Image (tube, rainbow, N blue to C red):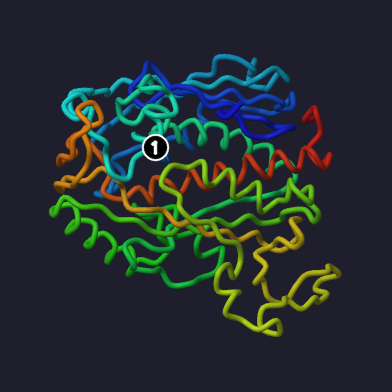
Amino acid sequence: MENSIGKMLAITSFGESHGPCVGVVIDGCPAGLPVSGADIQSEVNRRRAGGSSASTSRLEKDKVEILSGVSNGFTTGAPVCLLIRNEDVDDAAYEEIRSKLRPGHADYPAYVKYGGFNDWRGGGKFSGRMTATFVMAGAIAKKLLAVIGVEIIAHTAEIGGIAAEAMSYQEIKKKATKDSLCCADPKASQAMTELINRTKESGDSLGGVIEGIALNVPVGLGEPLFDNLDGDLAKALFAIPAVKGVEFGAGFAAARKKGSENNDPFIIKDGKIMTGTNNAGGILGGMSNGMPLIVRVAVKPVSSIGIEQQTVDIEKMKETVIKVGGRHDVCIVPRAVPVVEAMMAVTLCDFAMRAGLIPRVIR
């Protein structure tokens, strides 16, 4: 079951980067939810390549097909199966380096784990291509969360050390969705774009930071001790290839604060209990506390680069060099923004269903 996540709302991802298709099965989706292909397609389109100079030249149509679980525009209660066919596939660049381990990729552990039978084309199931399946599942989860008023948005907070200025949620929502890098700060976005272009010319790559925000999260989501909300969110976010770090609220900065600085004082506002600050990032004791849920995700630089690197030819058991060809992103951060939203949505939706807040039939 390593390809599945969730309990009440469980998703199973299938397919490979250069196989016939990639897809997802969503089990446990309530009946009666209005769903159209356009609802899912609009989310998938946000992840597609071609939106900025940072993205790959592999231009898949990413046309979503609904195979089951939806009839006459509503979910039926049966498992929802969604599929995208791989059409713009080119194995040639991978055939040339098939036996050479690509630095930064999962080639070596996958080769050992699966006895050499792993799909080496584009990384197989370890490819970022698989995140298209996460986004499809996230589109359904977002619609379910909307039933209880939960809203999720993510944005590019940093690329290559260039950080966006902090701003309100409403500003982020208004500006980030219109920016090619999903950055709400126009000046930072311009500087990021210039850096991306220079890096592309040199054959290298960049990483960055994505911030995810969830509003109107009900108090008490999470099942401590071991199914805590931040733990399961981190697990879901770490399923995104290239994610190397996850922090909530003040995150690692909390380690450098005093208790008097880090504690969030409780207040009453408009008849509701809330906190004056949000260093906890909306989670206390593994449960949501009603404040905005704030998570930041560190994304490493793309591993496939056009610079010669040292490696090993695993068939010859000989040290050699490799220069990765093919079509690759310079920076995946902008395309990963909707993926972060999707995994947040899937996790929060699962916990909301476990808490009985989302009914089995939507009316």
Which of the two residues, 256 or 273, is positioned nearer the viewer here? 256
Which of the two residues, 270 or 303, is positioned nearer the viewer here? 303
Relative image position of residue 363 (x, y in whole percent): 79, 30
Relative image position of residue 59 (x, y in whole percent): 28, 31
Farthest front residue in view:
317
Judged left or right of residue 275, residue 90 is left
Farthest right residue in view:
271
Dividing the picture into quadrants, the one containing residue 158 is bottom left
Which of the two residues, 66 or 251, is positioned nearer the viewer here? 251
Count the labels in the image.
1
Tell me which residue sits at (28%, 64%) in the image.
Answer: 190
Relative image position of residue 335 (x, y in whole percent): 39, 45
Question: Circle 1 — which element?
Answer: helix
- The residue carrying mark 1 is 128
Dividing the picture into quadrants, the one containing residue 107 is top left
Relative image position of residue 46 (x, y in whole percent): 42, 41
Judged left or right of residue 30, residue 43 is left
Tell me which residue sits at (27%, 24%) in the image.
Answer: 88
Tell me which residue sits at (83%, 67%) in the image.
Answer: 272
Tell me which residue sits at (60%, 74%) in the image.
Answer: 254
| Mark 1, other Cα within 10 Å: few <14 / some 14–19 / many ≥20 | some
Q: Is residue 255 above or below residue 212?
A: below
Quadrant of image for the N terminus: top right
Three-letter code for the amino acid on which mark 1 is drawn: Gly
Dividing the picture into quadrants, the one containing residue 311 is top left
Judged left or right of residue 338, residue 188 is left
Which of the two residues, 29 or 262, is positioned nearer the viewer here? 262
